[in-house]
Amino acid sequence: MPNPAAAGLTAEEILARVLYRDGLVLVIDKPSGMPVHAGFGGGPNLEQSFVHITFGLPRPPSLAHRLDRDTSGCLVLGRHTKALRDLGEMFANGSVRKTYWAIVEGVPKSEEGRVKAAMSKVDDGPGWKMKVDPQGQEAITDYKVRGITDTPHGKRAWLELHPHTGRTHQIRVHCAELGCPIVGDRVYGAKDRSETLMLHARGVALPLHKKREPIRVRAPVPMHMREILVACGFTGDKSGDKNLQGEADLPPKSA
């Protein structure tokens, strides 16, 4: 596949990234390095390719939430207005359960725990960033260490993270708050390395129907994270990466 930062996705490329679809939603595997929508400067973005995944409906699907430019994995789209409205309510009330995998610098002091650190946006020179701020918006993330490896840059850990809130850059800030910024994060971590951000939206569970179990979808590990995940103990997805519904690495409903 060509560098996604250099060009939009073709019909064939985005169709290959559809992980789940029904009459209400699509879940696609977002590539790292491509923004989900056009910024102030324009340029290639994932939303441009939605015209290729209408699957018979008169309009392309729309974003139900956002992922950062360099974050890969499960991205949820609504296929029509009512679906988008329902998805918006689910994301807002926290009923959508999400799992992220990250490779971080160092190892947290505790094998698992909860980061509860409110956040707010601040200007940072020509741009902006988020910071921990007791007066900011509530932000809660659970984490668990799933593996550790030694590298030329020191120890690195594979974390599984479950955000209970959906603040901008929440996982990136909370990992930095643990003292373990995400590898490749040049905003909240090391600014002098050329590594790609190692943050992956691994799984999502959507309670689309009140009397049914949530729809569970899992995104396969991206190539830029696979080698170090294996070093940390990852043994590979089960057969059939494209048929991952029901196998997401997700917390129990009571979490």
Image (spheres, helix red, strand yellow):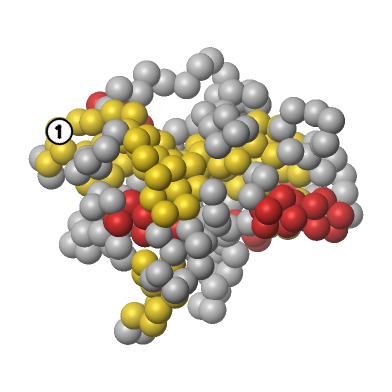
Q: Is 211 located above or below residue 188 in the figure?
A: above
Packing grade of label 1 (10 A; few <14, some 14-19, many >=20) is few
Image coords of residue 207 (percent x, y): 74, 38
Check disc 1 and report the residue beneath it.
150
Judge by depth and name the residue closer to the eye, 118 or 35.
Answer: 118
Image coords of residue 234 (percent x, y): 35, 23
Q: Quadrant of the rendered structure where residue 82 is?
A: bottom right
Give me the residue at 54% from left, 32% from top.
251
Q: Is 204 located above or below residue 181 in the figure?
A: above
Does any portion of residue 183 appear in the rendered image? no
Q: Quadrant of the rendered structure where residue 222 is?
A: top left
- Left or right: where does residue 137 sit relative to residue 194? right
Image coords of residue 229 (percent x, y): 32, 31
The kind of residue on which mark 1 rests is Asp
Q: Secondary structure at mark 1?
A: strand
- Left or right: where does residue 53 sit relative to residue 226? right
Does any portion of residue 213 appear in the rendered image? yes
Q: Is 245 located above or below residue 48 in the figure?
A: above
Give me the residue at 67% from left, 57% from top.
92
Judge by depth and name the residue closer to the eye, 166 or 197.
Answer: 166
The residue sitting at the top extreme is 239
- Left or right: where does residue 30 sit relative to residue 243? left
